[in-house]
């Protein structure tokens, strides 16, 4: 089966495999304009488009299914707004922003774009994104009315025409044509309370439908991240989990901003080295590896390095789940995000009795390679942060 055929099958089954066959009918009954996309499929394609959305944009269902949402952008779409949306997707969070999009016939229109992630309750993984798109009502400024004068006269004349002529079809047609093709592309339209309330209500209806039909399959979803396997620790973004999963060395990430610096990520190699399962590790401080004979002075050295936001390499007696001990060559290093703030500490472990080091690298260089890979993964998560964020 070709790659395109596989991708098409994934798009077709994206919703029904999770929420049952009935979910499509339930979503089709909702009148609001919205899309559902699947970040787990290459290209982050659209897997559902509502009737309201298709009517608003002029596209047919088959013309948008499987395509990325960028097809609705155009020459006057603000790049900063696009980056804000991409950043929200990368960070797996909700975003609400006014943006200029384009219909199939090329006419621009301002919308309130309200997007939120859908999480799996059992693992906190992002399954889909729901994007409600509410048309923004035109709010004519004084300047805008003056521009319209050549066609409809002054504001007073416009009111008279509306009353006397019942806003003739020709007058409406000229106004809408000029307004949508000219003013909309140049003058930003900001969403008001009415559009924001409509978007919030639509999101709630969609989430309710998805939650209801996910319960039919036993694979429940929710609109907020539900934590990681009952550990009480917030899950990392899926994109970061995927990047970290490619690193083969034994390591954990700890969160210095949470009480007792809990482990928020543990590599497969770490689990293999220690004999613990991921559920037994997440949310705990690394001290659970200590035991009789663990050098207290070395622990003080580690604590001092963390307090000083410095790296350190130590040798420590640690214990596996089965009670067996191993000499741990431990390297700890702060990991900073794109803005330079410490986001995590990475702790790379190596059993000194194991000499299986690939490529002839020393244990120290092998560990530094893991640290470097972790830092790249974390920084790339928020590499576009900053310029596209509104000032606080």
Image (cartoon, rainbow, N blue to C red):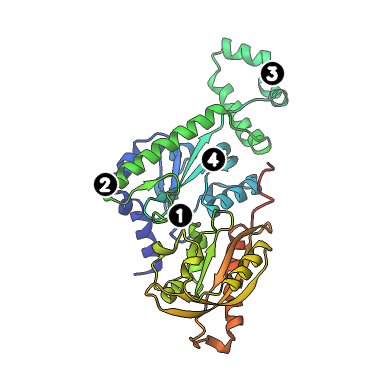
- CA gap, disc 2 to disc 3? 59 Å
- CA gap, disc 2 to disc 1? 25 Å
SS class of the residue under badge 2?
helix
SS class of the residue under badge 4?
strand
In the picture, measured across the screen, residue 351 lies left or right of residue 388, that is left
Residue 98 location, x and y as percent?
Answer: 59, 38
Residue 246 location, x and y as percent?
Answer: 49, 71
Report if the CB atoms under discs 3 and 4 are less than 8 Å apart.
no
Residue 192 location, x and y as percent?
Answer: 58, 29
For the N terminus, which image quadrant?
bottom left
Residue 240 location, x and y as percent?
Answer: 52, 61
In the picture, measured across the screen, residue 91 lies left or right of residue 341, that is left
In the image, residue 197 sits, relative to residue 288, either above or below, namely above
Residue under pointer 3: 153
For the C terminus, which image quadrant?
top right
Report if the CB atoms under discs 1 and 4 are less than 8 Å apart.
no
Residue under pointer 1: 45
Residue under pointer 4: 113
SS class of the residue under badge 3?
loop
For the residue carrying disc 3, how many other residues have a C-alpha within 10 Å: few (<14), some (14-19), or many (20+)?
A: some
Q: Which of the two labelled residues, at mark 4 and mark 2, occupies the earlier sequence position?
A: 4
Q: Which of the two labelled residues, at mark 3 and mark 1, occupies the earlier sequence position?
A: 1
In the picture, measured across the screen, residue 30 lies left or right of residue 174, that is left
């Amino acid at each position: 089966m070709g790659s395109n055929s596989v991708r098409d099958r994934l798009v077709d089954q994206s919703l029904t495999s999770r929420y049952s066959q009935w979910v499509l009918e339930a979503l089709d009954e909702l009148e609001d304009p919205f899309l559902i996309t699947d970040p787990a499929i290459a290209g982050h394609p659209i897997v559902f488009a509502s009737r309201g959305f298709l009517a608003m944009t002029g596209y047919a269902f088959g013309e948008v299914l499987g395509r990325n949402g960028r097809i609705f952008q155009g020459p006057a779409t603000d790049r900063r707004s696009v980056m804000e949306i991409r950043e929200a997707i990368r960070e797996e969070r909700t975003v609400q922003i006014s943006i200029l999009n384009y219909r199939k016939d090329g006419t621009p229109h301002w919308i309130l774009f309200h997007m939120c992630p859908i999480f799996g309750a059992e693992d906190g993984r992002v399954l889909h994104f729901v994007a409600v798109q509410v048309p923004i009502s035109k709010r004519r400024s004084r300047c805008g009315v003056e521009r319209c004068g050549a066609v409809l006269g002054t504001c007073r004349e416009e009111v008279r025409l509306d009353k006397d002529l019942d806003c003739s079809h020709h007058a409406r047609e000229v106004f809408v044509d000029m307004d949508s093709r000219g003013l909309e592309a140049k003058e930003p339209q900001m969403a008001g309370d009415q559009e924001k309330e409509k978007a919030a209500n639509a999101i709630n209806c969609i989430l309710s439908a998805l939650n209801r039909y996910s319960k039919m399959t036993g694979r429940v979803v929710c609109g907020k991240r539900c934590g990681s396997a009952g550990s009480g620790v917030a899950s990392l973004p899926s994109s970061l989990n995927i990047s970290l999963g490619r690193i083969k060395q034994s390591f954990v990430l700890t969160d210095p901003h949470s009480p007792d610096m809990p482990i928020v990520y543990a590599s497969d190699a770490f689990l293999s080295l220690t004999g613990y399962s991921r559920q037994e590790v997440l949310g705990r401080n690394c001290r659970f590896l200590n035991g009789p004979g663990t050098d207290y002075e070395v622990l003080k050295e580690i604590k001092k390095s963390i307090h000083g936001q410095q790296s350190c390499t130590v040798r420590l007696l640690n214990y596996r789940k089965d009670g067996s001990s191993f000499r741990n060559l431990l390297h700890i290093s702060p990991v900073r995000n794109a803005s330079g703030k410490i986001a995590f500490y990475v702790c790379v472990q190596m059993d000194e009795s194991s000499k299986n080091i690939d490529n002839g690298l020393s244990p120290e260089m092998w560990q530094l390679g893991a640290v470097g890979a972790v830092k790249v993964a974390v920084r790339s998560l928020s590499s576009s942060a900053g310029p596209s964020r509104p000032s606080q």
